[in-house]
Amino acid sequence: EIVMTQSPATLSVSPGAGATLSCRASQSVSSNLAWYQQKPGQAPRLLIYGASTRASGIPARFSGSGSGTEFTLTISSLQSEDFAVYYCQQYNDWPPLTFGGGTKVEIK
Amino acid sequence: EVQLVESGGGLVKPGGSLRLSCAASGFTFSSYSMNWVRQAPGKGLEWVSFISGSRSYIYYGDSVKGRFTISRDNAKNSVYLQMNSLEAEDTAIYYCARGTMVRGIIFDYWGQGTLVTVSS
């Protein structure tokens, strides 16, 4: 099973500032990585797949990069609606499909 | 518009059973795999089970293998999760999620979830 590790667990950011979230895989997942956003009381929403391809309707301030075992989600100029928990998920080697533990982006 | 609506959650005693349902609309249901993903209170996401559009492929996470059964009825645009021998650790919100194949499965649409509580 591929273990996904996200860091940091919590990121405090001021509105308008940028944020960089990390996700590491225990073995290479190539570019088969997705990112999801989850707001309190809501279901997750797909943001990024293929490590860097934005899903339909996702604003350009969200960008993903990386391949192999190291991945980054960057949010430029955080808006109020961006404060949420973000999860990465690998789909290179499955089952099982595995998620990281999440990074909470909170208002500083 | 794609919609996924789960139902069937509730309070059940340890060792009991529950059947979750997910009604889908807004897309050609039989063309997509369907998944169940759960989230324990205050915790992260855990993939539970996968079923392909034709029902040819079915997979489970290790924590539920042998206790849970996924099924689907393409005529009714619905997917189900039969949960037996429930344990306290199964307490979670259960989400139904559409799977799209992009070299692997990503979850591009999610329902709002149904809460399952296992407690005596």
Image (cartoon, coloured by chain):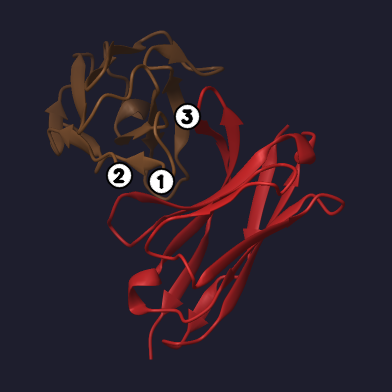
* Residue A57, horizontal then vertical, whole percent: 54, 17
Residues tagged 1 and 2 counted as in contact (Cβ below 8 A):
yes
Q: Nearer the viewer, residue A33 or B111?
A: A33
Residue at the spot x=45%, y=88% of the render?
A: B13
Which residue corresponds to mark 3? A46
Residue type at mark 1: give it: Pro
Q: Evaluate whether label 3 is on the same chain as label 2.
A: yes
Q: Are marks 1 and 3 in contact (CB under 8 Å)?
A: no
Which residue is disc 2 drawn over? A1
Q: Which chain is red?
A: B
Q: Indicate the amino acid at tag 2.
A: Glu
The reply to whether residue B112 is in sight is no
Labels 1, 3: front one: 1
Q: Is residue B39 visible?
A: yes
Q: Earlier in the sequence, mark 1 or mark 3?
A: 3
Q: Mark 1 sits on what residue?
A: A96
Q: Are marks 1 and 3 on the same chain?
A: yes
The residues tagged by marks 3 and 2 sit, at their Cα atoms, a distance apart of 22 Å
Chain letter of the residue beneath label 1 in the structure image:
A
Residue under mark 2: which chain is it in? A
Secondary structure beneath label 1: loop
How far separated are the C-alphas under marks 1 and 3?
A: 19 Å
Residue found 16% across the figure and 22% down from its top: A14
Q: Residue B59: percent from the left, percent from the top?
A: 53, 52
What label does residue B11 carry, if any?
Answer: none
Describe the element under mark 3 as helix, strand or loop.
strand
Q: Residues within 10 Å of mark 3 (few under 14, many from 20)?
A: many
> In the displayed structure, would residue B68 be above or below residue B33?
below
